[in-house]
Amino acid sequence: EAQVTQNPRYLITVTGKKLTVTCSQNMNHEYMSWYRQDPGLGLRQIYYSMNVEVTDKGDVPEGYKVSRKEKRNFPLILESPSPNQTSLYFCASSLSTATDTQYFGPGTRLTVL
Amino acid sequence: QKEVEQDPGPLSVPEGAIVSLNCTYSNSAFQYFMWYRQYSRKGPELLMYTYSSGNKEDGRFTAQVDKSSKYISLFIRDSQPSDSATYLCAMSAGGFKTIFGAGTRLFVKA
């Protein structure tokens, strides 16, 4: 089954404790992206990757890191999480660009205390 | 001012009603217009996709783009309780960035 998977689905952590949210897709897509979703603000793009080893900042990259060492995986790293990063996070992938259909993962609800 | 404005609702309608969802935008470079549907506790899924101006119809759903007014709409005919979800408009000028609206929560009452 073609899908985007994210882990964990739910995470409660404390300020400053490094964490990684994994994202994997099995569709051989070149483009992958991370979004955060907050009430009233919709989905905002954090980082995106056009292909292996090629990443770029979205609209809200502060406090986040990403890497793309393999085509299928695109982890999101919070090196020192803060309470304002409490949010619902989605990973998405598409064939090659943002204008292709984006397939979203199920989401990761993160709470930073 | 946000690049994309969307009324968050909620919008509550009776079953069978025609629903109209709208977004306005400020960036005249946007050429690709999308509507995503998001059920509770799920990721968004693409519903409709339009390039440039015009209308596109798919079953009970019609997407309209008016670039002169910087206004896009999604119409749902004969709405069903299963249409209850959050609808997000999304736009792109091409390339690697997509801008989403805040989403409109829709409730269709049986």
Image (cartoon, rainbow, N blue to C red):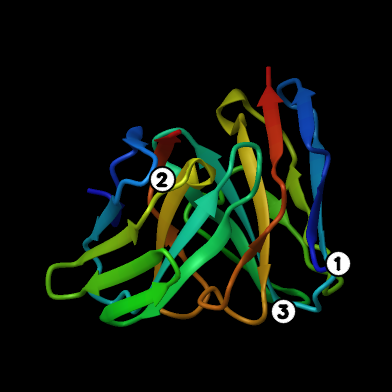
Using the rendered view, name the quadrant where residue B52 is placed. Answer: bottom left
In the picture shown, does residue A101 fall above or below A83? Answer: below
Q: What's the residue at 43%, 67% (across, down)?
A: B34
- Mark number for residue A1? 1
Nearer the observer, disc 3 or disc 2?
2
Closest to the camera, between mark 2 and mark 1, is: 1
Residue at the (13%, 68%) spot, across then down: B69
Q: CA distance from mark 3 to mark 2?
A: 27 Å
Disc 1 packing (10 Å; few <14; some 14–19; many ≥20): few
Tell me if mark 3 has few (under 14), some (14-19) or many (20+) residues whose alpha carbon lies within 10 angstroms of its own: some
Percent from the top left, x then y, of residue A43?
A: 49, 49
Vertical order, B51 against A47 (above or below):
below
At label 2, which amino acid type do we have? Gly
Image coords of residue B24 (percent x, y): 23, 57
Taking the view exactly as shown, the residue that stands out farthest to the top is A113
Query: What is the quadrant of the C terminus of chain B in the image?
Result: top left
Q: Given the image, what chain letter belongs to the residue carrying mark 2?
A: B
Q: Is residue B51 left or right of residue B3?
A: right
Chain under numbered label 1:
A
Mark closest to the chain's N terminus, 1 or 3: 1
* Kind of residue at badge 1: Glu
Q: CA distance from mark 1 to mark 3?
A: 18 Å
Residue A63: numbered disc? none
CB contact under 8 Å: marks 3 and 2: no
Marks 1 and 3 belong to one chain: yes
In the displayed structure, does residue A84 sit left or right of residue B100? right
For the residue labelled by badge 3, is the local secondary structure a helix, a strand or a loop? loop
Q: Determine whether A113 is above or below B78 in the image.
A: above
Instruction: Identify the element where label 1 is drawn.
Output: loop
Q: Give the image location of residue A61, x and y in percent.
A: 56, 51
> Mark 2 — residue?
B103
Label of residue A30 in the image:
3
